[in-house]
Image (tube, helix red, strand yellow):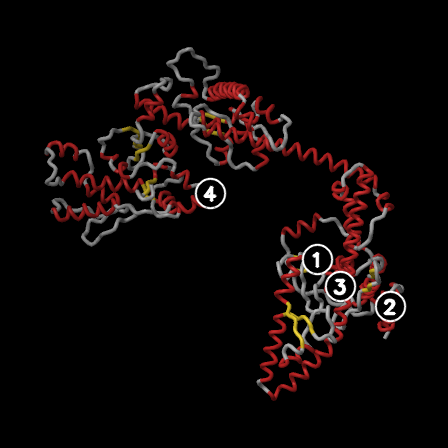
Amino acid sequence: MEGQAVEKSTASDPEGSSLALLAAEAEAPQAAPPTKKARHHAFAKRATIERPPCRLAGMPLEILAEILSYASTPATVLALARCSKYFCHTLVNNPSTTFIWRNARARCRLDRYVIRELPEPLHNFTESSYAAFVFDGGKCEVCGKHTRRMYESFCLRARVCDKPTCKSNWSQDNLIEVGRADHPRYKDLVSWIPRMETQGLAEARIRVRRRDWDAAVDELNRALLEPDTMEQFLAKKRALSDRLATTSKWAGELTGFKHAWELQARTVKEANEARANICAIDEGWTAFELIGTPTYGLLHRSKTASLEMIIAADFNLIRDQVDKEVAERRERAIRRKAEGAYEKRRGDVAEHYSRLKSAPEAKETLPTLPEFRRLSVMKVLQGKPTDPDEGVAKDLKNSKLLNELLSDSLRQWREDARSALAGVLGFAGWKSASKNKLHPVDRLTARFMCKKCVSRGKGGEDLDFAAACEHRCAGLNKRQRARETWNANLFEPDTKAIDAANKVLALLQTAGEDPESKTRAEMIGPKFLCTACPVPIAMTLDSAIRHSKRHESFTLTFTGEGDSRLDVYKSFPIPTGLTARLMGQGDDAREERSQKVYGCRHCQQTARQAISPTEEREPTAATSVAPDARSSEASARKPESQILRAEGVDGSAGSSTAVAGNQPQTAPPAGVPATDSNKIERLARKLAKEKLYSFDGLRSHLKQKHGVVNVRDEDVYAAPSSA
């Protein structure tokens, strides 16, 4: 009873005391908070921690109600209720705060030309849901985009944006005009079907939704097929017809309020924009700068949203603060323009650097891009004030003087780098006037490794002079890479690679300072054989030097074209650069890795060794070899039984597969007949048909069976279809 008395007094006096209404809050039953457990995300927790505390949430409810008593529309209270769970529970789920919504609705009066008040809600609305129903936006039924407009028809609950095409298309496609005389069979439908508010029930014709009309016609036809339920159907529709009169009247009042609201909103918006133009002209600013300031922009948006006009007194209170913000805004614009021009110049320098590296005639070593930017010419060019749209691309392409200065800077940088890296190799201050002596960094024995990369396990080994100059440490973030500088002290001699290079020079019977030594070693091609591996593996010069890291005592030799150990490389050549491409992170590399077209070079060479003795012992009719020559060559090889036993191949007639393990098998007895020898040969030939893997599977095979962790080109061969 007390609650009813308080509510009646509030309804009679909308501006009554809020303290009297809040007095019974402790006695009134409070809605229980939601029991559903909320989800907590890391981003939401971080955002909550960084957000400043809300001052309104710490205020007593009486003071909050007094503040909200100045709200001009329920939309303001609705916006606050949606700010947090606390305000939602306080303003929406709390019956004792209903008067706040009623007072805001009572103050929502539009008196531009004719006084328009927000109508009372129907009985099925709460104050908060009624505010959301009237002032919320939604999706346009035609284009599907979000619009902040109210319903086009409150009775139909149809929302259309302010585009003229959407309004006309919605009216033509979704509405149908009907009357009692048009469809005599369905004349009763007009009394209960929802319709547009523009025409009342007393008029002969109404506009309804096409789909509503079709649904009502189908429902009536189904009811006519069952005469027993017709009376019940008509009674139900008479109740709808009785409620429709009240609903249509209420919807018509809301439509009038909407038109007045939109008219006043346009008027207030134009007036506030005109006021901004006047204030900006008086102060020597632009309207865009004025509205873009935080202080005046907040005032402009809040006043326009609440349909209040800005007056001169409002601007005078914040003039000094706005002046500071406009000055800061102009400074930021100048800095932004300068930063854009600087970024454009840096991009032009990076593009020119890429052009120099990819030039077909480029033979000189280039520094890394950060070091290239630090050259004196590039520093001046990047710091040169230019227009953001122009940059320095034309100067870099067309200026002959600039290119000459850049060439001199690069030449000086290369000389300094050569001298510094020669000191790393132990040739500090090396000078020679002889043309028959290579510079220490140009020799085959000039091999470096990065201290940082090696300590982190990120590679950086076996770098020649050009690779050392272009080396950038891996595993650095963006900030670390920006501060990274190239220095010769970051490198140290790669002793294993240098020892391997010295062994190559010893095989060639030449010295590292010989100008022809490097060319002679490279001309040999893939004919270097590692004799430290269980089976000889052929490789190129660079592969041999990198391969030396696998062995404590590395030994190698090179052979000629007639060596049978190189026969398999004619059909399956060394795929230069294959492993580096397959180890990439792109989608193409991932797809290429998944193909089962890669074989193990170690297994291939082992299988060829198993076949070769049999082929040499059993000559065919088409070939004739002298017995003494054949016996002398075969004497240097192992018997085929030992080779097959070492590879785990069973010589029995029932075995037809190669065993992956290396357990010893029973050797064929002495004096094996020709038929058994043919069986062994067939088994060896089956072993020669090497199994193909995906690249990841091949890596596992090499690690498990051959102990190869870092897979390189000499360990892999690709099927001819994929080469």
Earlier residue among tags 4 and 3: 3
Q: Residues within 10 Å of mark 3 (few under 14, many from 20)?
A: many
The answer for how far apart the CA atoms under marks 4 and 2 are is 70 Å
Relative horizontal placement of residue 346, taking residue 674 as reference (left or right): right
Q: Circles 3 and 2: CB distance less than 8 Å?
A: no
Helix, strand or loop status at disc 3 = helix
SS state under label 2? helix
Which of the two marks, 1 or 4, is nearer to us in this view? Answer: 1
Q: Earlier in the sequence, mark 3 or mark 1?
A: 3
Identify which residue is drawn at 35% across, 29% down.
541
Q: Nearer the viewer, residue 592 or 451?
A: 592
In the rendered image, the vertical position of residue 156 relative to residue 240, given as above or below: above
Q: Secondary structure at mark 4?
A: loop
Q: Earlier in the sequence, mark 2 or mark 1?
A: 2
Mark 4 burial class by Cα count in 10 Å: few <14, some 14-19, many 20+: few
Q: Which quadrant is home to the N terminus?
A: bottom right
Label placed on residue 148:
1
The spot of residue 516 in percent (x, y) is 34, 19
Picture quadrant where residue 305 is located: bottom right
Residue density around tag 2, few if under 14, some if 14–19, many if 20 or more, within 10 Å: some
Residue carrying label 2: 10
Q: Amino acid at mark 1?
A: Arg
* Mark 4 or 2, nearer chain start: 2
Q: List the residue tagged with mark 4.
A: 585
Residue under pointer 3: 131
Q: Amino acid at mark 2?
A: Thr
User: Is 292 or 207 nearer to us in this picture?
Assistant: 207
User: Could you tell me how far apart the alpha carbons at marks 3 and 1 are, in whole angstroms?
Assistant: 14 Å
Secondary element at tag 1: loop
Q: Amino acid at mark 3?
A: Ala
- Farthest front residue in view: 181
